[in-house]
Amino acid sequence: MKKSDNIDFQERKHSKKGIISCSLLVIECILFVVGVVQSYKNKGNGGIYLGIIGILIVLFALIGAYLAYMGLKEKGKIKKQTAWFGLLFQLLALIGMSAVFIAGTMNFV
């Protein structure tokens, strides 16, 4: 009987860096919702606190994208789905926050 290369019965764990990246993504989503709600309550006048929240989201997204990338490069018997998920959505968070920042600066011109 031919041994199948597709079946692997060994215990494989998710990448720890990918899990941390996904955890940071959850924190970013919570911060984003808090920022949107506060901006709505203040009728668009968020002030410095919303700017800090936005910068924190970008900082967490950069760290999360780096960790996800490093999780993809890990060797051994690990699952890389969480690292791929983290990298994809961290990059989407960076693009989204960049769009928010660009839209915010266009209102002042």
Image (tube, grey):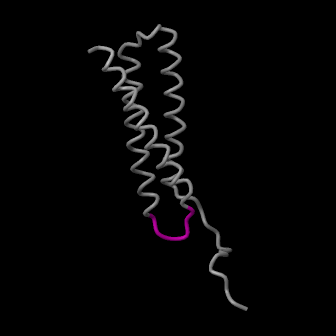
- Residue at left offset 41%, top offset 57%: 70
Q: How many marks?
A: 0
Q: Is residue 76 found inside the magenta-colored segment of the image? A: yes
Query: Left or right: 33 with respect to 102?
Result: right
Where does the magenta region start and end?
74-79
Q: Nearer the viewer, residue 72 or 99?
A: 99
- Residue at left offset 50%, top offset 15%: 38
Residue 49 x/y as whole percent: 39, 18
Q: Quadrant of the C terminus?
A: top left
Query: Left or right: 3 with respect to 17?
Result: right
Q: Main secondary structure of the magenta part?
A: loop
Q: Nearer the viewer, residue 77 or 96?
A: 96
Q: Is residue 29 found inside the magenta-colored segment of the image? A: no
Q: Nearer the viewer, residue 9 or 106?
A: 106
Residue at the bottom extreme, as displayed: 1
Location of residue 79 with respect to 98 vertically, above or below: below
Residue at the right extreme, as displayed: 1
Residue 72 x/y as whole percent: 46, 60
Residue 58 x/y as whole percent: 38, 35
Location of residue 55 with respect to 48 vertically, above or below: below
